[in-house]
Amino acid sequence: MINSILYFGRKNCEYSDNLKTFLSKKSKKFYYIESKKMYEKLPNKNFLKKNFTYIICFRSFYILRKKLINKASIATINFHPGPPEYRGAGCVNYALYNNSKFYGVTSFIINEKIDNGKILDVKKFKLTKKDNVESTLNKAYKIMLEQAKTTLTFLFKDQNNLKKLIKINKQIKWSKKIKNVEDLNNFYEIKINSTKKELIKKIRATNTKSFKPYIKLHSKKFIYQDN
């Protein structure tokens, strides 16, 4: 049984809730904070002043600062819904646009930089031509949940296993390229002079129920709608 865990998840996310239940049974003291949107500020919780054995992030929007990261006596770990080739925002969008044959998820030690810390585990799966943003993410979240449970169970057995995972995966490197939210917003634009092939690629890589690609014409934005 772990002494204490601080867990950051996402509101209205079945995968975050599933991992919450799992972690709460593994810890004597369990603390949970859920995020709702990008750029959300951490709530003013008294327990954030405490120290923890582990700090775990799963689909969390919060960006943790050094002071909080260092409150974990063993490790602060994030589960990233993308492979090391894709850092930052829009991993799945760029992977689909690039016609990647594989996609994946990554667990790693959090440091002060975005998607930069020592890698603990990578799980990849094959993409098909029929995959879109939503189908790919659904596959990724399921695999990431299992990755989280497997990785954390291994770590909780013996804290020395952390060094073992880092050593096993030391040859895997993060991409030097990183994308932010502004890059992703710009990526959603379809250029007026796009070829049909380019148009199909961009729609596949950006079109979801919640987010849509768009074109700009005479300072007006026109949002793509499905037939």
Image (cartoon, rainbow, N blue to C red):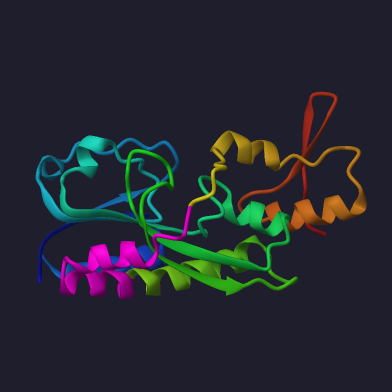
Quadrant position of the C terminus in the picture: bottom right
Q: How many marks?
A: 0
Between residue 172 and residue 2, name the one nearer to us: 172
The quarter of the picture where residue 158 lies is bottom left
Between residue 67 and residue 212, name the one nearer to us: 67
Look at the picture and state if 20 lies above or below 94: below
Give me the residue at 28% from left, 38% from top: 42
Q: Is residue 129 left or right of residue 92?
A: right
Measured from the top left, where is residue 64 in percent x and y? 30, 41
Per the image, is 51 magenta?
no
Measured from the top left, where is residue 45 in percent x and y? 17, 41
Quadrant position of the N terminus in the picture: bottom left
Per the image, is 170 magenta?
yes
Give me the residue at 22% from left, 69% from top: 161
Measured from the top left, where is residue 189 in percent x and y? 74, 39
In this orientation, does residue 8 appear?
no
Q: Is residue 209 left or right of residue 19?
A: right
Q: Is residue 138 left or right of residue 52?
A: right
Magenta-colored span = 149-173
Look at the picture and state if 167 lies above or below 6: below
Between residue 214 and residue 151, name the one nearer to us: 151
In this orientation, does residue 129 appear?
yes
Give me the residue at 25% from left, 63% from top: 163
Most common SS among magenta residues? helix
